[in-house]
Amino acid sequence: MKLPASAIRTIEMWRLGFVATVTPGGRPSVSPKGTFIVVDEETIAFGEIRSPQTVANLTVMPECEVNFVDQFTRKGVRIRGRAAFLRPGTGEFDALYPRFVALWGDLAKRINLIVRIPVDEAKPLSTPPYDDGATEEELIAVYKAKFAEMYE
């Protein structure tokens, strides 16, 4: 499935995705990953640096969902797919790795493997104030003010 342009913009602007998996015992698990890239219009990936539980979960059950949210517009995307591991020394890893280096420099040296997720489903996310007529500009102004207060 092709990612909408709005989803690509959100992922490339924020890079932080919350990956939902299922543990081998059947429990839900959500973990933030801050190294996401859009591989192409149908695939996303993240560099695994310190995510042993996420890797263990995906090894048993590769189905996952990743949520990305623009913190100011409060819009985003839910992406579902089956994760695959790209290991160092393979052609697929070697082809993608330079993109991680370009974005994160020395941090990329800590990548143990790349988790590639072909997009099976992509659904938009938005916050309830839009249901009541709020505009994107209004929400951006509200959350800019909140962030400014929090980080004074």
Image (spheres, rainbow, N blue to C red):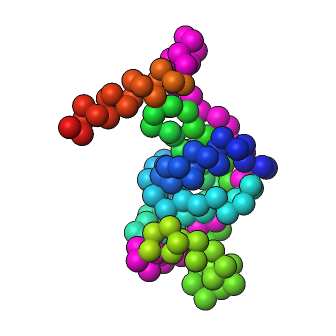
Q: Is residue 48 above or below residue 73?
A: below
Q: Position of residue 46 (x, y in %)?
A: 55, 64
Name the image quarter holding the C terminus. top left
Q: Position of residue 136 (x, y in %)?
A: 54, 25
Residue displayed at 58% across by 71% down: 99
User: Where are the magenta residues, as a range?
Assistant: 106-135
108 relative to 4 in the view: left or right? left
Q: Is residue 144 above or below residue 6?
A: above
Answer with the quarter of the image where residue 67 lies: top right
Residue displayed at 40% across by 73% down: 107
Residue displayed at 64% across by 44% down: 7
Q: Position of residue 91 (x, y in %)?
A: 69, 84
Residue displayed at 45% across by 37% down: 71
Q: Nearer the viewer, residue 30 or 124?
A: 124
10 relative to 5 in the view: left or right? left
Q: Nearer the viewer, residue 101 or 55?
A: 101
Membership of 129 in magenta stretch: yes
Answer with the quarter of the image where residue 149 lies: top left
Membership of 112 in magenta stretch: yes
Q: Position of residue 83 (x, y in %)?
A: 64, 62
